[in-house]
Amino acid sequence: MYMKVRYLSVFALVALLACNGQDKKQNNYSQPSKVVGSGVFDLYDIQQNGELIVLMLYGPGSYFEFRGESFGVQYMLVNEYAKSIGCRIRVEMNHNPKEMIEKLQRGEGDIIATGIEMTDSLKNILSYCGNKELDHFLDSLSVPMRDASLKTNGKTAWAVRSDANILKQSLNEWIALNQSHFSEYTTIKIKSSGGKTYTPRRSVKSPILNLAKGQISTFDNYFKSYSRQCGWDWKLLAAQAYQESGFDPNAVSWMGAMGLMQLMPSTAKSVGVSQAQVFDPECNIRGAVRLISQLNSHYSSIRSESERINFILAAYNAGPGHVDDARALARKNGKDADVWFGSVDYYALNLSKAEFYNQPEVKHGYFRGSETYDYVSKIRSRWDNYRSKIH
């Protein structure tokens, strides 16, 4: 994400979710100065630029990254709005609501899509939109998603700058017309190049196909062949495949990862696996090994091969950005950034907490580190099991 400053008089502002621990102090935000002759920068100007710049905070209900792709309830909603006005979306991340409002006034964004609470003190610079509809939707998600942070206080809304009247009207109309589709908009859908939509699915096979014959799976020949390309034991690659898909080559995760090694669509493309090939076991393994080789280079400074494997596995699961954030926090706190268990894993586990992911060393924000912690541990354990039983 990069910054493009616009010195203009008006910008849009969106707020869907009141964040826990939000700074509720009253701030006297000054009105931005206008550029002579520029008029108000409103909806038409945004459409002419073709880009809607969104200011957001990290969080499970707002915006987060997973294996290099963007997710989050609020992000997905505002992205749909951007499509409706014919714009692409660009997200700029912030540490707190005050920072978002100040950036908005300086002309560094069009919409704030997280964390603004409706207050009288901001009415001179903000116009709120969609309070009841958005609060109702976010509250309705808190139970099925088992995430109390999605619950609102009834006082959160989308908002625009007080003089962006056309954008305000556009947002109000879009919310009113599309509120019944919010659930659909925030459900991840994976479509093939031919237009087929895939839903989450997984059929778990036995972790060892035939112990007497020393056969872990029907894909052993591929594991043996391609593991040489990344310098791994083939049994480690098999253990990772089982953790990813349960040896189901047609598996699709709820986040959109596909195939035996659960490649995300953008990742598959980057390692030379087309949409038509993603469910082919050999192609999927080939792509995964290319990704593992890339991660091996990324963590080449870690001298211990065993430790490097831990970081490669963690980065394969979470994306290297989140793992690098955990390493940065480990260094900051005097821990060994080249050791996973008992050092970096602690910070990975805690990157789901605002007091950790909002620290300045963290560049990729929120992520659910417990999944990555379990991922590394379970693959190492299964690899040990395979090595002890398969000869």
Image (cartoon, rainbow, N blue to C red):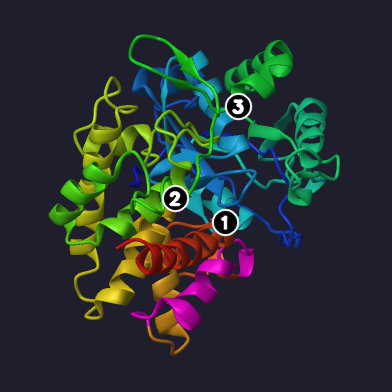
Residue corresponding to mark 1: 368
- Residue 29 x %, y %: 63, 53
The numbered mark at residue 203 is: none
Using the image, determine if residue 258 lies above or below residue 178: below
For the record, the magenta segment spans 337-355
What residue sits right under mark 2 in the picture? 208
> How dense is the environment of label 3, judged by Cα within 10 Å: few (below 14), some, or many (20 and up)?
few
Q: Nearer the viewer, residue 78 or 271?
A: 271
Instruction: Rate crowding at label 1 as few (under 14), some (14 to 19) or many (20 or more) other CA atoms within 10 Å.
Output: some
Q: Please state if 199 lies on the left or on the right of 391 as rendered.
A: right
Mark 2 or mark 3: whose residue is earlier in sequence: 3
Residue 66 appears in the picture as rendered: no
Q: CA distance from mark 1 to mark 2?
A: 29 Å
**C-alpha separation, residue under disc 3 versus residue under disc 1:** 19 Å
Are circles 3 and 1 on residues that touch, CB within 8 Å? Answer: no
Q: Establish if 58 lies above or below 53.
A: below
**Disc sitting over residue 187 in the figure:** 3
The mark closer to the camera, 2 or 3, is: 2
- Give percent across and percent down for residue 216: 37, 49
Figure label count: 3
Of the image marks 3 and 1, the number of the one nearer the N terminus: 3
Q: Secondary structure at mark 3?
A: loop
- Which residue shows up at 53% across the image and 56% down it? 367
Q: In the rendered view of the protein, which quadrant contains the C terminus? A: bottom left
How far across and how far down the image is residue 327, in percent?
40, 74
